[in-house]
């Protein structure tokens, strides 16, 4: 639970550009590490250039909007609930169903042995 709160706080601060100033590239590589090329599960790698658009297009309008607000705008689920005027339960349901659908599609196209959780 503490881990998730820390991640949410980090997303919140990053969305408000808290970390934009004073970071040198060497500090960023020390924190994030070097990307491993042997096991690349990025969406572009798994789905291809146009495949990601197709998968995201298969989501409902609410699911797409919630994922956009959560991952690209940095809002929390509670903030999205207030912004869209929907109950928090609906927001969580759309969020987790969208993630489940994306995971399922990624496992269908990725290496054998992939397991959805």
Image: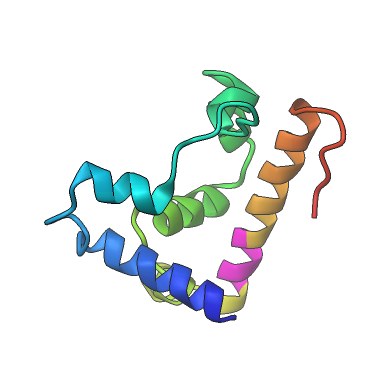
Q: How is the image coloured?
A: rainbow
Question: Percent from the top left, x then y, of residue 12?
Answer: 34, 68
Which is the main secondary structure of the residues drawn in magenta? helix
Q: Is residue 24 one of those drawn in magenta?
A: no
Q: Which of these two is toward me, 83 or 17?
A: 17
Q: Residue at 54% across / 19% down in the picture?
A: 50
Q: Give the residues drawn in magenta, as a range.
A: 90-95
Please say whether residue 87 is visible from this viewpoint.
no
Task: State the residue lying farthest toward the left.
Answer: 22
Q: Is residue 25 left or right of residue 52?
A: left
Question: Percent from the top left, x then y, of residue 92?
Answer: 60, 69
For the N terminus, the quadrant is bottom right
Task: State the residue lying farthest toward the top.
Answer: 49
Task: State the residue lying farthest toward the right.
Answer: 113
Q: Taking 109 as reference, is 23 above or below it?
A: below
Q: Residue at 80% across / 55% down in the picture?
A: 117
Question: Percent from the top left, x then y, of residue 110?
Answer: 74, 28
Q: Which of these two is toward me, 83 or 50?
A: 50
Q: Residue at 42% across / 67% down in the picture?
A: 84
Q: Is residue 34 left or right of residue 42?
A: left
Question: Percent from the top left, x then y, of residue 76?
Answer: 43, 70
Q: Is residue 107 left or right of residue 7?
A: right
Q: Taking 54 as reference, is 6 above or below it?
A: below
Total numbered labels: 0
Q: Which of these two is toward me, 16 or 19?
A: 19
Please say whether residue 18 is visible from this viewpoint.
yes
Q: Residue at 40% across / 56% down in the picture?
A: 69
Q: Taking 70 as reference, is 80 above or below it?
A: below
């Amino acid at each position: 639970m503490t881990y998730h709160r820390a991640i949410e706080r980090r997303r919140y601060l990053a969305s408000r550009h808290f970390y934009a100033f004073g970071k040198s590239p060497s500090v960023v590589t020390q924190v994030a590490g070097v990307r491993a090329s042997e096991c690349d599960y990025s969406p572009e790698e798994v789905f291809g250039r146009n495949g990601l658009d197709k998968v995201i297009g298969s989501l409902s309008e609410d699911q797409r909007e919630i994922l956009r607000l959560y991952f690209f705008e940095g809002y929390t689920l509670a903030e999205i609930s207030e912004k869209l005027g929907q109950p928090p339960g609906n927001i969580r349901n759309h969020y987790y169903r969208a993630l489940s659908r994306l995971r399922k599609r990624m496992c269908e196209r990725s290496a054998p042995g992939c397991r959805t959780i």
